[in-house]
Image (spheres, rainbow, N blue to C red):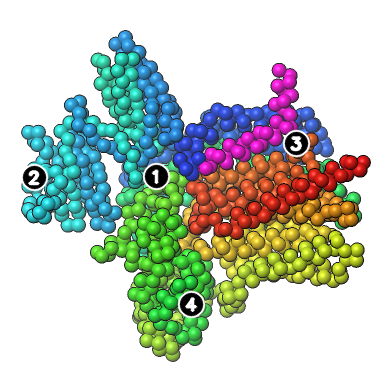
């Protein structure tokens, strides 16, 4: 037993736990992407062995805190840092075992006092014998339920044997069944025919179309039985069409019509038919290719003599239907779905409000106006629930999640986890305090590394500056476009300088918005050789031309192929509408929006992105994208062209109504003088009514200049160039008795510092122009990572030019990558969940960590290169460089790990304040945790004799960055999850990526061989 205790509390076993946790979580994210969330939870996240791993981690950590005396005065800060993880694990355990989540569905003018659990349950009961179990069925893990019942003295076994996700009910004739109607219908704008299975008492309620089968309240279409025959009656005048001969018979409203299978019935633009009628049938389940929002569990019932298999239909988050199976003298009841959980108060929905993009049917945000009624506490209170604005009552937190298709009902997600949340928050606080104190504690390992550099004749690293960094971080087209009319340059120049109110309320030059529009729609900076200003102006002037141009990018290849995209990438607007003008993807878009973000798959997300791009095009065609006319009240949104402005006098009102149209007409007729005159009048109008809101000519000129110069795109080649030249000079000096002139080294380092100054000014200008911290989207965050990496290089490289050169090379690569992802800006309003100050803090800290971890990786690469070039003649000089770079590598990795850890858990705070769950095993947050675990292993390798060593550490620092890349890029592009707010989809892996990895692997192997030979030779010499 003592040997087992020693083994379980050893540091090598701790390293095993680190790797086991990282590996299991990584596998789970790929399982989730391929087989769905229930499978990942059933196989990994909700398993006992996964809990045991975390328990062993806590046990090992607690023991080693006492063994290595973390609570002495010298190590107290280190102890505080590690205690925070124990507190967080305790909070997570309380959340896991004592808290719950659910969904509350409320229709307008109705109340609800219960929620449906997010956990799934399966129930089986017979004659007072009952069993209910929490289950996580998936097609990989179907065998989750088993029960035994005593039926007339026989032992009857009930067990689950199969599961179908997105199941479709298929009727099968049976003497013990009920009447079933196999019904098919089509609605205006719908995507083809839709199926529905009617049983007695069922009602189909679809916008504009209702039907019922033997129901007391008459619907638009009513099916009923009479003498064993199926009939229908209708409140609409119907036409019955024979499918074979196309002969048509008309029926009046209220007529009794004998139903004939496979005869087409219609009224208006609605069509329906009865595919089949079963006088007596039961249902089996088959796999559907479409999203059915219904699953099926196959239950085997056996008494030892005979067996039967029954499908039980249900779905997560939905009320379960009871299936009754005759068994002996009684009935076996089976049910699968969510469990109703009663709450001690009720919520009444007064109004559900859905805001849409201007001129579009697509939603931009939604909110619920509710009344909280708690009779026990005498509370009746009006509350508005929307994203990042929750209802908190009696430990329950209600969040706006989704809504009904008819927009008459709301779906609220509910969380009950007071103690788990606040204990976890206490852990986050202790983590923050532990990080700060560990960095400044003179007995900490970080300060030991600093002293080590001092002993190498180096000045002290500015620790407060380091921490400040962490805290502050907070082609064929040309020919296709030949027929597009040219627009005079003077008109384009005047147009781009107009002010416009952006979707976030910011007043900006129209040049900024046109650039975002073109990149959003096409993911290109220009189209057909025209600037973004020319493209947008031409789209408004000649919409009929641009409707037929392939300009709308579809990132998902399968969807692009399905919709007939040109080059499997671009669609024309007109191709998305049929001959009757119906929007081909409307039903798919509605279905995607009706689902909570966490449950949307990749295709559904791309439908939303595509719909957004199409809507932006129409808003440009109609001019409604451009709010150009200020209002009398500054808090009111500006008017777009063509608006009816009753608050103004006749002349100004007419100008708003018709002035811009006159401008477009002048442009179309190539009448430059009239067009410019209208723009001048519009500029005067903006100054007259919006002078106190307009930022001023200086700010406009700076923003336009910033857009034209694009500083980050211009400096990244020079980062790469001067970083390479500086490293080249330093490496040459290793082999020369007489070094190259120092002016080269300092000159290149000085140029890099100058580029960093431009980089900093560019970030400051972007902050000044946008009015918010410059890390709110993918492009900005990568630019910020590059800045943080370069700052880290300058701090750690004050006496080490090689660090500066490495950081410059890294920053150049990061800025290059930023301009690959720069093509998908947030033109339409921010996703509501992103409108949170917690986002700014979370993103700034976590992206700053990537800069430090990236520098650590590149320093590791530099050490590998030094190993390769080391020989007898230069060994002493190279070894000095190796020691210094490794020390800086450790310091950079430590700061990066601190920032990444704290930033990751701050993301939990953001998530909890936005949708009520501080940790949900979303792939993005899981990979962030994996990265924390991996780098925790890397910085602790020095404590394990078998893993310590310069080569091992630098190799691990290189390999570990693959987890950062997966967290930042891979999850966004190749895994499903919540973290894809307008960030785009990858088209595939660039061939340069595997080539780069192969070259890096070759370098590491070469370095390993050279280092091994060097160490053997040194041992032999000694």
Which residue position holds label 2? 257
Which mark lies nearer to you, 2 or 4?
Answer: 4
Taking 930 as reference, is 58 above or below it? above
Numbered circle sitting on residue 316:
none
Which mark lies nearer to you, 4 or 3?
Answer: 4
Tell me how far mark 2 sits from mark 3, CA to CA: 81 Å
> What residue is drawn where x is 18% and y is 49%?
272
Dominant SS type (magenta): helix
Neighbours of disc 1 within 10 Å: few (<14), some (14-19), many (20+): many
Q: Earlier in the sequence, mark 4 or mark 3?
A: 3
Tell me how far mark 4 sits from mark 3, CA to CA: 61 Å
Circles 4 and 3, Cβ within 8 Å, touching? The answer is no
Q: Element at badge 2?
A: strand
Which residue position holds label 1? 411
Q: Element at badge 3?
A: helix
- The span shown in magenta is 1-30
Which mark lies nearer to you, 2 or 3?
Answer: 2
Tell me how far mark 1 sits from mark 4, CA to CA: 46 Å
Numbered circle sitting on residue 530:
4
Q: Position of residue 588 (x, y in %)?
A: 35, 53
């Amino acid at each position: 037993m003592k040997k087992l205790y020693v083994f379980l509390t050893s540091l090598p076993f701790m390293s095993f736990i680190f790797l086991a946790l990282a590996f299991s979580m990584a596998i789970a994210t790929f399982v989730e992407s391929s087989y769905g969330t229930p499978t990942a939870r059933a196989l990994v996240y909700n398993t006992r062995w996964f809990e045991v791993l975390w328990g062993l981690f806590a046990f090992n950590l607690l023991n080693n805190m006492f063994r290595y005396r973390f609570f002495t005065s010298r190590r107290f800060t280190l102890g505080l840092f590690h205690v925070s993880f124990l507190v967080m694990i305790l909070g997570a355990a309380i959340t896991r075992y004592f808290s719950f989540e659910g969904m509350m569905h409320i229709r307008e003018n109705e109340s609800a006092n219960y929620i449906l659990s997010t956990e799934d349950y399966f129930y089986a009961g017979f004659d007072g014998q009952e069993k209910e179990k929490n289950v996580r069925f998936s097609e990989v893990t179907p065998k989750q339920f088993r029960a035994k019942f005593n039926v007339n003295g026989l032992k009857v076994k009930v067990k689950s044997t199969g599961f179908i996700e997105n199941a479709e009910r298929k009727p099968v004739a049976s003497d013990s069944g009920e009447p079933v109607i196999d019904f098919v219908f089509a609605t205006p704008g719908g995507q083809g025919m839709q199926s529905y299975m009617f049983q007695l008492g069922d009602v189909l309620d679809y916008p504009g179309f209702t039907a019922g089968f033997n129901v007391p309240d008459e619907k638009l279409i009513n099916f009923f039985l009479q003498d064993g025959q199926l009939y229908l009656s209708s409140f609409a005048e119907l036409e019955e069409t024979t499918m074979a001969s196309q002969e048509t018979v008309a029926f009046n409203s209220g007529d009794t019509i004998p139903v004939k299978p496979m005869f087409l019935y219609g009224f208006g633009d609605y069509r329906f038919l009865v595919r089949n009628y079963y006088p007596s049938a039961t249902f089996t389940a088959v796999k559907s290719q479409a999203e059915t929002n219904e699953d099926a569990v196959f239950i085997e019932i056996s008494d030892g003599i005979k067996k039967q298999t029954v499908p039980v239909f249900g779905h997560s988050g939905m009320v379960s239907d009871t299936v009754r199976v005759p068994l002996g003298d009684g009935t076996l009841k089976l049910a699968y779905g969510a469990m109703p959980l009663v709450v001690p108060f009720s919520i009444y929905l007064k109004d559900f409000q859905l805001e849409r993009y201007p001129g579009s049917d697509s939603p931009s945000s939604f909110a619920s106006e509710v009344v909280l009624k708690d009779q026990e506490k005498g509370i009746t209170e009006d509350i508005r629930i929307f994203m990042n604005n929750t209802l908190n009552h009696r430990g329950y937190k209600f969040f706006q999640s989704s809504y009904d298709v008819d927009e008459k009902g709301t779906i609220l997600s509910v969380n009950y986890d007071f103690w788990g949340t606040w204990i976890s928050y206490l852990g986050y606080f202790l983590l923050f305090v532990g990080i700060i104190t560990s960095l400044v504690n003179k007995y900490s390992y970080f300060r030991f590394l600093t002293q080590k550099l001092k002993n190498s004749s180096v000045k002290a690293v500015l620790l407060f500056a380091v921490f400040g960094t962490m805290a502050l971080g907070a082609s064929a087209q040309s020919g296709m476009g030949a027929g597009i009319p040219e627009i005079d340059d003077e008109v384009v120049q005047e147009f781009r300088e107009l002010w416009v109110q952006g979707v976030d309320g910011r007043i900006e030059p129209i040049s900024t918005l046109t650039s975002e529009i073109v990149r959003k729609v096409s993911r290109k900076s220009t189209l057909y050789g025209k600037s973004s200003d020319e493209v947008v102006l031409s789209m408004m002037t000649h919409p009929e031309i641009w409707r037929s141009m392939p300009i709308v990018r579809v990132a998902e290849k399968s969807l692009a192929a399905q919709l007939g995209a040109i080059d499997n990438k671009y669609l024309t607007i007109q191709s998305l509408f049929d001959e009757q003008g119906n929007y081909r993807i409307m039903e798919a878009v509605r279905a995607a929006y009706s689902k909570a973000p966490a449950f949307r798959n990749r295709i559904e997300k791309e439908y939303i992105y595509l719909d957004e791009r199409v809507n932006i095009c129409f808003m440009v065609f109609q001019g409604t994208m451009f709010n150009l006319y200020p209002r009398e009240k500054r808090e009111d949104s500006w008017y777009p062209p063509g608006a009816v402005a009753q608050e103004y006098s006749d002349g100004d009102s007419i100008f708003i109504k018709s002035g811009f149209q006159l401008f477009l007409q002048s442009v179309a007729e190539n009448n430059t003088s009239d067009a410019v005159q209208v723009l001048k009048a519009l500029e005067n109008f903006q100054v007259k009514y919006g002078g106190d809101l307009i930022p001023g000519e200086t700010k406009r000129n700076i923003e336009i200049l910033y857009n034209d110069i694009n500083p980050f795109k211009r400096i990244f080649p020079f980062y790469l160039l001067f970083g390479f030249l500086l490293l080249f000079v330093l490496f040459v000096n290793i082999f020369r008795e007489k070094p190259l002139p120092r002016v080269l080294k300092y000159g290149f380092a000085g140029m890099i510092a100058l580029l960093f100054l431009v980089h900093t000014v560019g970030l400051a200008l972007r902050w000044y122009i946008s009015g918010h911290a410059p890390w709110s989207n993918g492009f900005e965050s990568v630019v910020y990572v590059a800045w943080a990496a370069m700052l880290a290089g300058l701090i750690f490289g004050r006496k080490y030019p090689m660090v500066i050169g490495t950081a410059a090379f890294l920053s150049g690569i990061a800025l290059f990558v930023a301009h690959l992802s720069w093509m998908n800006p947030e033109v339409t309003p921010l996703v509501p969940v992103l409108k949170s100050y917690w986002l700014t803090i979370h993103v700034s800290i976590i992206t700053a960590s990537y800069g430090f971890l990236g520098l650590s990786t590149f320093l590791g690469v530099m050490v590998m290169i030094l190993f390769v070039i080391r020989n007898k003649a230069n060994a002493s000089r190279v070894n000095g460089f190796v020691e210094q770079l490794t020390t800086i590598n450790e310091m950079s990795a430590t700061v990066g790990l601190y920032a990444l850890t704290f930033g990751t858990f701050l993301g939990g705070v953001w998530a909890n304040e936005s949708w009520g769950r501080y940790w949900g095993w979303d792939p993005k947050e899981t990979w962030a945790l994996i990265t924390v675990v991996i780098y925790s292993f890397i910085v602790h390798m020095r404590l394990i004799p078998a893993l310590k060593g310069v080569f091992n550490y630098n190799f691990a620092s290189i390999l570990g960055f693959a987890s950062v890349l997966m967290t930042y890029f891979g999850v966004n592009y190749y895994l499903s999850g919540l973290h894809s707010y307008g960030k785009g989809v990858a088209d595939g892996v660039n061939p340069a990526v595997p080539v780069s990895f192969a070259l890096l692997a070759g370098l590491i192997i070469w370095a390993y061989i050279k280092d091994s030979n060097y160490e053997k030779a040194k041992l032999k010499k000694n």
